[in-house]
Amino acid sequence: MKRSVLLACLCVAIVGACLPADAQTKPAGSNDNKVVAGAKAVGRGIMWGPKKLWGGMKAVGKKVSGK
């Protein structure tokens, strides 16, 4: 039991020591997540047509109903 607690504390200490050092080595504002940004751009491109279609249908509905 004491060994597993000691091992867990040691792992937490090692990870805690590595994270601030890793954060300092990266330049501020660097975008490492280019895959996510690309997927968002593709998603926006795919959803552009349905958004325009829905906006047109709403405009026609307003003209027909007179509201």
Image: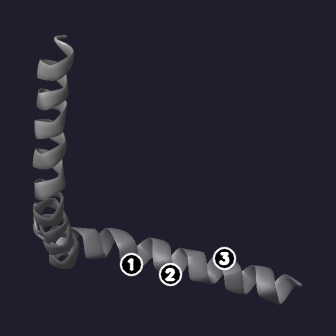
Residue 14: give its label: 2
Q: CA distance from mark 2 to mark 1?
A: 6 Å
Quadrant in the picture for the N terminus: bottom right
Q: Residue at x 18, y 58 (%)?
A: 47
Looking at the rendered structure, the kind of residue marked 3 is Cys
Reply above or below: 9 against 66.
below
What SS does tag 1 mark?
Answer: helix
Q: Residues within 10 Å of mark 2 (few under 14, many from 20)?
A: few
Farthest residue, direction top: 67
Q: Position of residue 45 (x, y in %)?
A: 10, 64
Pointer 2 with pointer 3, Cβ within 8 A: no
* Amino acid type, residue under disc 1 in the picture: Cys
Badge 3: few (under 14), some or many (20 or more) residues near its Cα, within 10 Å? few
Q: Nearer the viewer, residue 41 or 46?
A: 46
2 and 1 marks in contact (CB < 8 Å):
yes
Calculate the distance from the C-alpha at mark 2 to the C-alpha at mark 3.
Answer: 9 Å
At a point 62% along the width and 82% down the height, the residue shown is 10
In this view, the residue in front, 13 or 51, is 51
Of 38 and 21, the residue lying toward us? 38
Query: Left or right of 9: which side holds 62?
Result: left
Give me the residue at 70% from left, 86% from top. 7
Q: Dot 2 lies on which element?
A: helix
Give the CA distance from mark 1 to mark 3: 14 Å
Q: Amino acid at mark 2?
A: Ile
Mark nearer the N terminus (1 vs 3): 3
Image coordinates of residue 15 in percent, x first then y, are: 48, 78
- Location of the C terminus (image quadrant): top left
Name the residue tied to disc 3: 9
Kindly identify which residue carries mark 1.
18
Task: Examine the image and state in which quarter residue 13 appears.
Answer: bottom right
